[in-house]
Amino acid sequence: MHQRQAVIERIRRVSAGVQRLELAVEPPQRALSGGQFFLARTTATYDPYLREAWLPVALNDKTIVVERPTRYQYLPNQVVDLLGPLGKPFPLRNSARALLLIAYEAAPSIFLLMLQSALARNSAATLVLIGQAQQYPLEALPSALEVIRAEHYETWAERAQHIAWADQIFAVAPPPYDLPAYMRLLEDAQRVRHAVSAELLYGIFQPPMPCGIGACQACLVRLQNGDEVPACTEGMAFDLTRVNLLQSLADSAGA
Ligand code: FES
């Protein structure tokens, strides 16, 4: 993990709500996998105090492309302070030939880098966009991807078939949607597949991350074995059979 300066070389508006920033970083970032991210500070002050999570969607020879909502404004040649790459690569299995990706109320940007690798080795991938995620521009997605839209989780008509079909499933939902969404998905997977094996079903946890290095304990995820582990260093994807979703839901209801 490094702290480094990046320069915004190019800004491309992908749609009304999505823009992509091409960042030149020094030294060039060559090792970066789907699921890893940066914490960025765009001002010299601590206002805002929290850095923003910037998600890489493509990696070029000398630049990294990140995706940001257009409600944030950036300028060419603007210097950004980056912390990272943070987190662990998504545990995509080499043998996974059928990949199901689910975005609840969130842009699916976090999947795009992993998708490049999966599609390059001819895996089939289906992306389900639920709720606000339906606003994501289809033209920003790889053409080989099957995309399904649903207003609500319950109106995703063929979800049992998709869940049964997949070799691996990754779901992303922002807090506070994450815990209920992952609980419902795990229950569905248990019902459809009878048993959910390890390394099948992952939820992506994106709590606020003040430090990004596992020091402040603000981003802990509670596991079934009683451990609490930081999402910033051990995530952001967690095997949902290992997460104590029931206790986490009870904790969040009492918070
Ligand atoms: S952000 Fe501080 S421990 Fe994860």
Image (cartoon, helix red, strand yellow):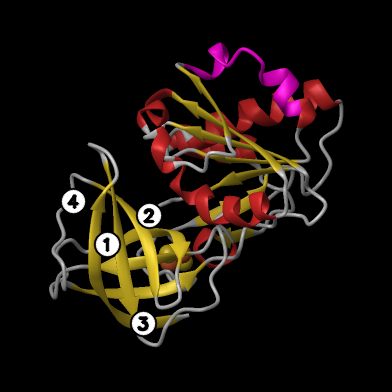
User: What amino acid is found at the position of numbered circle 3 in the picture?
Assistant: Gln
Give the residue type that dot 2 points to. Pro
Q: Earlier in the sequence, mark 2 or mark 1?
A: 1
Q: Which residue is identified by label 2? A: 208
Give the side of residue 238 with respect to residue 98, left or right. Answer: left
| Among the two numbered marks 3 and 1 on one chain, the one whose residue lies closer to the N terminus | 3
Q: Amino acid at mark 1?
A: Leu
- Give the structural element (helix, strand or loop) at label 2: loop
As measured in the structure, the alpha-carbon distance from the residue carrying label 4 to the one carrying label 1 is 15 Å
In this picture, which residue range is highlighted in magenta?
A: 152-163
Determine the main secondary structure of the stretch shown in magenta: helix
* Callout 4–callout 1 Cβ contact below 8 Å: no
The residue at the far bottom in this view is 27
Q: CA distance from mark 2 to mark 4?
A: 18 Å
Q: Relative to residue 155, is residue 97 drawn left or right?
A: right
Question: Which residue is disc 1 drawn over?
Answer: 50
From the image, tell me which residue sits under label 3: 3
Residue 238 visible within the image: yes
